[in-house]
Image (spheres, rainbow, N blue to C red):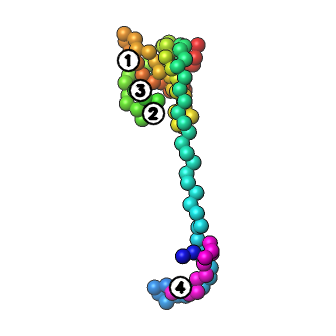
Amino acid sequence: MRSSALRSLATLTLGVGLTFSGTVATASAVTPAAPAAAVTCDPGSATVYFIDTAQLRNGYYSDAKFLAWVGRGTTASYSEWCKNKYGNVWYHLKKTTSRPAGWVYEGYVRRI
């Protein structure tokens, strides 16, 4: 039973015989965490150029399963891009004879 956010503490005796008198503040409500940002995807198709060697992954998060390396200077077509819940943009590269389909982070490529 709570009558206010502040409660008076008459006397608190600590284990070594010290005494504390005063007022203690208690929280009246818990603020929920901010909701995660929504994932957005767009089925656009274009070409990207790799400005650095990058890892191709099976999802649009850095902890997704590694599939293959793609070298700097490579050009590749993508079939869609997604912005994940952290606001990072990833491109879904189309499969080729030398590379599986997979996702690459925008920091490693430039759209051409």
Inspect the image, locate mark 4, and give the three-letter code of the amino acid beneath it. Answer: Leu
Which residue sits furthest bottom? 17
Q: Earlier in the sequence, mark 2 or mark 1?
A: 2
Give the labeled residue for mark 4.
12
Q: Which residue is drawn at 57% across and 75% down?
A: 2
> Which SS type dominates the magenta stretch?
strand
Q: Distance between the residues labelled 4 and 2?
A: 51 Å
Q: How far apart are marks 3 and 2 (CA)?
A: 8 Å
Q: Earlier in the sequence, mark 3 or mark 2?
A: 3
Residue 62 in percent (x, y) is at 45, 33
User: Pointers 1 and 3 in contact (CB under 8 A)?
Assistant: no
Q: How far apart are marks 1 and 3 (CA)?
A: 10 Å
Residue 1 in percent (x, y) is at 54, 76
Q: Which mark is residue 62?
A: 2
Q: How crowded is mark 3: few (under 14 residues within 10 Å), some or many (20 or more)?
A: many
Q: Which mark is residue 78?
A: none
Q: Which residue is drawn at 37% across and 17% down?
A: 100
Inspect the image, locate mark 2, and give the three-letter code of the amino acid beneath it. Answer: Ser
Q: Nearer the viewer, residue 66 or 82?
A: 82
Q: How far apart are marks 4 and 1 (CA)?
A: 68 Å
Give the labeled residue for mark 3.
57
Residue 16 in percent (x, y) is at 47, 87
The magenta segment is: 3-13
Q: Is mark 3 on a helix, strand or loop?
A: strand
User: Pointers 2 and 1 in contact (CB under 8 A)?
Assistant: no
Q: Earlier in the sequence, mark 4 or mark 1?
A: 4
Q: Is mark 1 on a helix, strand or loop?
A: loop
Give the labeled residue for mark 1.
100
Which corner quadrant holds the C terminus? top right
